[in-house]
Image (cartoon, rainbow, N blue to C red):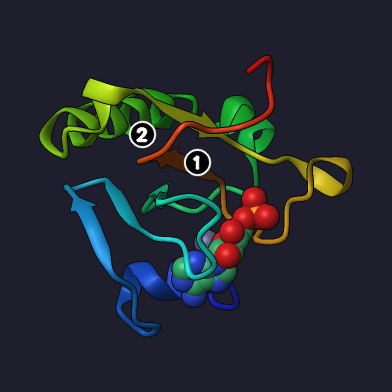
């Protein structure tokens, strides 16, 4: 989508600090990190959110989660553990409407039962 900032990152029109890339998936550092390690993983092919992806391009889930898993092992994040989060819509706090998965780690994370 031409007005989507994450599509612009994929196209190289907006700079990003890449941490992972393959044919289909891009991982890059979040501009406003909420943890020692805070990356965003996206599919290069635009969808709006997890439900749009699930309805229309479900194969992307495997691409994205395989990439996150591979990255976590290569970066050693997997050794200490990490968290994957996706926000959907207003109550979820979604601000960028290109499906993305926050990959958080590098420290003991609070909330969610800890
Ligand atoms: P969400 O609130 O789940 O939609 O997350 C959007 C995330 O994108 C936020 O954590 C922002 O800090 C991050 N973000 C917005 N613009 C950029 C950018 N140009 N490069 C990297 N991260 C960004
Ligand atoms: Zn997009």
Which residue does the numbered mark 2 point to in the structure image?
Answer: 64
Left or right: residue 84 compared with residue 50: left
Please name the residue shown 22% across and 22% down the image: 79
Q: Position of residue 63 (x, y in %)?
A: 31, 31
Which residue does the numbered mark 1 point to in the structure image?
Answer: 101
Question: What label sits on residue 68 in the rendered view?
Answer: none
Indicate yes or no: mark 1 CB to ligand 1 under 8 Å.
no
Image-quadrant location for residue 106: top left
Left or right: residue 114 compared with residue 78: right
Front residue of 52 and 33: 33
**Secondary structure beneath label 2:** helix
- The vertical placement of 80 against 4, above or below, is above
Q: Position of residue 94 (x, y in %)?
A: 73, 51
Quarter of the image that includes the C terminus:
top right
Image-quadrant location for residue 1: bottom right
Q: Position of residue 38 (x, y in %)?
A: 43, 51
Instruction: Compare marks 1 and 2 and give the one earlier in the sequence.
Output: 2
Please name the residue shown 81% across and 45% down the image: 89
Left or right: residue 78 compared with residue 53: left
Q: Is residue 49 visible?
A: yes
Indicate yes or no: mark 2 CB to ligand 2 under 8 Å.
no
Left or right: residue 51 compared with residue 73: right
- Circle 1 or circle 2, nearest the eye: 1
Please name the residue shown 68% across and 14% down the image: 113
């Amino acid at each position: 989508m031409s007005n989507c900032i994450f599509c612009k990152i994929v196209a190289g029109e907006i700079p990003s600090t890449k941490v992972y890339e393959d044919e289909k998936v891009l991982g890059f550092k979040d501009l406003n990190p909420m943890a020692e390690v805070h990356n965003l993983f996206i599919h290069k092919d635009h969808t709006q959110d997890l439900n749009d992806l699930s309805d229309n391009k479900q194969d992307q889930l495997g691409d994205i989660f395989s990439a996150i898993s591979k990255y976590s092992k290569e970066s050693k994040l997997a050794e200490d553990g990490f968290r994957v989060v996706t926000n959907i819509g207003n109550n979820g706090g979604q601000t960028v409407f290109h499906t993305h998965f926050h990959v958080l780690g590098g420290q003991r994370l609070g909330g969610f039962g800890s």
